Amino acid sequence: MPLAAIKVGDSLQKGLDTFFAFIPNLIAFLVILVIGFLIAKIVSGIVKKVGQKAGLDKALHESDAKQYVDRVSSDASPSAAIGKVFFYIIFVFVLTAAIGALKIPAVTAFMNQVLAYLPNVIAAIVIFVVAAALA
């Protein structure tokens, strides 16, 4: 058997070994992603219902903030918006955990940087909302 055929066979074997060794990581990624998505949806729904039961929507539509709420949408639901914010915050953490399960260092490092920057984004949003409320 020629030497080149042996090298191609070895390369193919190593490639298949690497591929099949990666499958458990991929399954863990998918499981974490699906379960995390469901948890984020449930928490989002709970936050929305609590906001509605607490009268947040009615209070905002009857307050001076009505004009700002109507600008966004006349049928806007602040409770639904807060629920969506909770969903996305939870989902960012879920996505970070799922990507960590893939064990790809470059992607994991990128998601960790995104996660480290998240408090700055949240602080900027809070400052913007408070400034808009005071104006």
Image: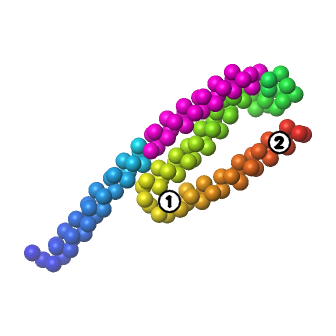
- Nearer to us in this view, 6 or 28: 28
Q: Is residue 37 magenta?
A: yes
Quarter location, residue 55: top right
| Quadrant of the image containing the N terminus | bottom left
Q: Residue at x 26, y 60 (%)?
A: 16
> Chief secondary structure of the magenta span?
helix
Residue at 80% x, 45% y: name it: 128
Question: What is the x, y in percent for residue 89?
Answer: 61, 43
Look at label 1 and name its amino acid.
Val
Which residue appears at 75% of the width and 25% of the height? 56
CB-based contact (under 8 Å), mark 2 and mark 1: no
User: Badge 2, how many Cα within 10 Å: few under 14, some, many 20+?
Assistant: few
Residue pointed to by mark 2: 130
Q: Element at badge 1?
A: helix
Q: From mark 2 to mark 1, how far is it between C-alphas?
A: 35 Å
> Which residues are drawn in magenta?
32-58
Question: Which amino acid is tagged 2?
Answer: Val
Residue bearing the label numbered 1: 107
Local crowd size for mark 1, using a 10 Å CA cut-off: few (<14), some (14–19), many (≥20):
some
